[in-house]
Image (cartoon, rainbow, N blue to C red):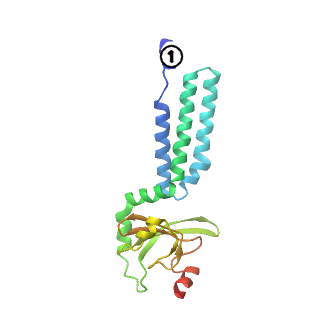
Amino acid sequence: MTETASTERHLNWWLPLSIAAGADIVLLSLMVYSPYGSLLYILLIAPIFCLVWLVLLVIAAIRKRRRQCLSLLLALVAFLVVSWALLRNQDVLRASLRWMLWSRRFKAEVLAQPAPASGELKHMEWEASGFAGADNTVYLVFDPTDSLAAAARGHSAGKFSGIPCKVPLVRRLESHWYSVWFYTNEVWGLGPCASSSQSD
C-alpha cells in the first residue's frame, strides 16, 4: 500500500523518455532500410501505438491515478513530437544514415565504372520510389571537381554540367559526392532526359 502511494506521488519520467527513444529507433530503422518505411510507420505503427496508449490513458483515468495519467500523456506527447520531427526531416536523415552506413560500398561501385565518354559525371541509382506512373529517382553522383557544391549549398533547381536533365534538388553527402533528385518519371539518359541532353 505504501509502495503504491509513494509511486503515485512521483511522476514517472522514464516512461516518456523510453517512448521517445523507442520511436527514434523504430522510425530511423524503417527509414534506413526502405524508402517506404515512413509510410508503414504513419499508416500502421503510429496509429496502433496511439490507440493502445489512449486505452491505457482511459484505464488510468477510470482508476483515478493522476500521476500515471500524466506520465502516459507525456509519453504520448513525446512519441508524437519525436515522430513529427523525424518525419519532417526524413529525406535528409535517410540519405545521411545510408551514407554513413554504406558509403564505402556505394563509392566502390561508382568508381569502378568506366569514365563516361559524353562528359557526364559517374553515377548510380541511389534511390527509387513512387507508385504506378509516378516514379522518383535519386542518383548518387561522383563529382571530382565539386562543381555541384554551389547548387547543393543553395538548394537550387536547374541544369548542371555533367547531369543530362534539369533537376529539382542536389544535396552534398561529402566532398565530391552528391545525391541528385530527378523530376518524376525522368531517368538518367532515358526518355525526356535523353532528348533534353541531346538538344543542349
Residue 144 figure quarter: bottom left
Q: Given the current orientation, which residue lies at the most extreme top position?
A: 2
Callout count: 1
Residue for point 41% across, 78% down: 121
Amino acid on which the number 1 mark rests in the picture: Thr
Task: Check the image and report above or below for 11 versus 175.
Answer: above
Residue 155 in the image: state x and y as whole percent. Answer: 49, 65
Residue 66 in the image: state x and y as whole percent. Answer: 58, 22
- In front of the other: 127 or 75: 75
Task: Check the image and report above or below for 186 versus 43.
Answer: below
Residue for point 47% across, 29% down: 13
- In front of the other: 107 or 169: 169
Q: Answer whether residue 46 is visible to the viewer in this image.
A: yes
To which residue does mark 1 refer?
A: 4
Residue 56 in the image: state x and y as whole percent. Answer: 60, 30
Q: Counting other residues with Cα less than 10 Å from the Cα at mark 1, is it few (<14), some (14-19), or many (20 or more)?
A: few
Residue 50 figure quarter: top right
Task: Check the image and report above or below for 158 versus 129.
Answer: below
Determine whether the residue tagged by mark 1 lies in a helix, strand or loop. helix
Residue for point 46% across, 35% down: 17
Q: Answer whether residue 191 is visible to the viewer in this image.
A: no
Residue for point 46% across, 36% down: 18
Residue 167 in the image: state x and y as whole percent. Answer: 53, 72
Left of 195 or right of it: where is 172? left
Left of 125 or right of it: where is 101? left
